[in-house]
Image (cartoon, rainbow, N blue to C red):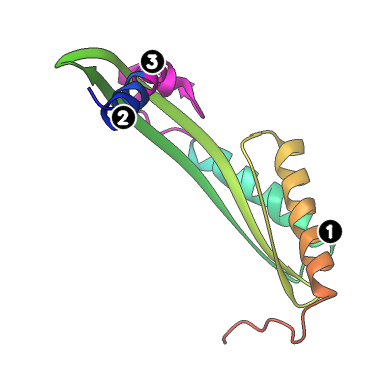
Amino acid sequence: MNRRDFVGLAGLGAGALLLPSFPSLGGELVDPARLLEPGLDVIQKKRFADVALNAAKAAGASYADVRIQRTLNQGIFTREKQVQNIGSTETLGVGIRVIANGTWGFGATNNMTDAGIAKAAQQAVAIAKANSKVQKEPVQLAA
């Protein structure tokens, strides 16, 4: 075996050792039956959107929009034609886009509480205001 083959195989082996823990990275392990559930109900989504929009407006945004995202991932990991692990993960978060002082600002969180969402909205406005100091022309939305 030459050096190149050895390094390649060693890298594959090291990567394979990480695979059994991969499904738990970045999300909550979920029972596959839960993947069919709708997630947040409409009332809860509207309440979270209201929290974000009100916090952004109170912080000085002239425009704001909110995206609530639920991401479901499923993975099957194999090694040498054998299934090593099967996993499902779910992540939930909110993204907030604002215009303040004529400049875009963005914030996001996976802290799905009123306080967490409000903080992300305030951070988005703070980012927009900071960016406005170097922006030459203000953003204007199309009519």
Residue 56 at x, y percent in the picture: 76, 58
The Cα atoms of the two marked residues, 3 and 1, are separated by 49 Å
Instruction: Please identify, in this view, whether the residue under mark 3 or under mark 1 is nearer the observer.
Output: 3
For the N terminus, which image quadrant?
A: top left
Residue 73: x and y, percent?
Answer: 36, 32
Residue 8, labelled with which disc?
A: 2
- The amino acid type, in three-letter code, at marker 3 is Leu
x and y percentages locating residue 20 in the rendered image: 37, 15
Tell whether position 70 is magenta. no
Q: Name the residue under label 3.
A: 17
Tell me the quarter of the image containing the C terminus. Answer: bottom right
Q: Name the residue under label 1.
A: 58
Return the mark for residue 84.
none
Q: Which one is earlier in the sequence, the residue at label 3 or at label 1?
A: 3
| Residue found at x 77% / y 85% | 136
Q: Along the horizontal axis of the image, is 100 left or right of 19? A: right
> Disc count in the image?
3
Single out the mark in the foreground, 2 or 3: 2
- Tell me which amino acid carries mark 1: Ala
Is residue 111 depicted above or below 117 in this figure?
A: above
Q: Give yes or no for residue 29 being in the magenta stretch.
A: yes
> Which residue is depicted at the point 44% across and 32% down?
39
In the rendered structure, which segment of residues is drawn in magenta? 14-40
Viewed as shown, does residue 55 lie left or right of 5? right
Horizontal placement of 57 versus 104: left or right? Answer: right
User: Which label's residue is closer to the chain start, 1 or 2?
Assistant: 2
